[in-house]
Structure formats: structure tokens, C-alpha cells
């Protein structure tokens, strides 16, 4: 079995920290910032395709 099955509490804590860190980027920002960020990310996909 993998790490999540061997130590679920540690896995849950690590995931919680990762989610909090990702969401911290949006602290103090409005919804327009999040929408623009998503739009820019989507438009950037495929820009560097082979």
C-alpha cells in the first residue's frame, strides 16, 4: 500500500497545508482576479506546443 494508506493522518495534514498554500495566493484578491488568473492560465496552455 502507498503512503496515504499507511499514514492517513499525515497525508490529510499535508494535503490541508498544500491547499492552504495554494489558496493563500488569492488572499485579499477579488473574484475578478481569480477569473483573470484562470483565463490567463487557460490561454497559456498550448502556447508552447511542439
Image: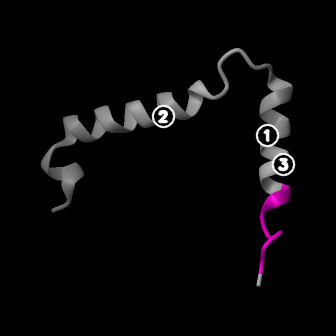
Q: Which residue is mark 2?
A: 19
Residue for point 13% across, 50% down: 6
Instruction: Identify the mark nearer the N-term, 2 or 3.
Output: 2
User: At which x and y percent is residue 42?
Assistant: 80, 55
Say whether residue 29 is left or right of residue 25. right
Q: Does 34 appear in magenta?
A: no
Find numbered disc 1 in the image and state the secondary structure of the residue it sits on: helix
Residue for point 82% across, 29% down: 33
Which label sits on residue 15? Answer: none
Q: Quadrant of the C terminus?
A: bottom right
Which label sits on residue 40? Answer: 3
Which label sits on residue 37? Answer: 1
Q: In the rendered structure, which segment of residues is drawn in magenta?
A: 43-49
Q: Main secondary structure of the magenta part?
A: loop
Numbered marks: total: 3
Q: Is residue 10 above or below residue 4?
A: above
User: At which x and y percent is residue 22?
Assistant: 55, 35
Amino acid at each position: 500500500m502507498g503512503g496515504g494508506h499507511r499514514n492517513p493522518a499525515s497525508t490529510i495534514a499535508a494535503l490541508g497545508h498544500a491547499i492552504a498554500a495554494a489558496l493563500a495566493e488569492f488572499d485579499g484578491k477579488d473574484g475578478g482576479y481569480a477569473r483573470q488568473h484562470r483565463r490567463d492560465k487557460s490561454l497559456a496552455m498550448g502556447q508552447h506546443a511542439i
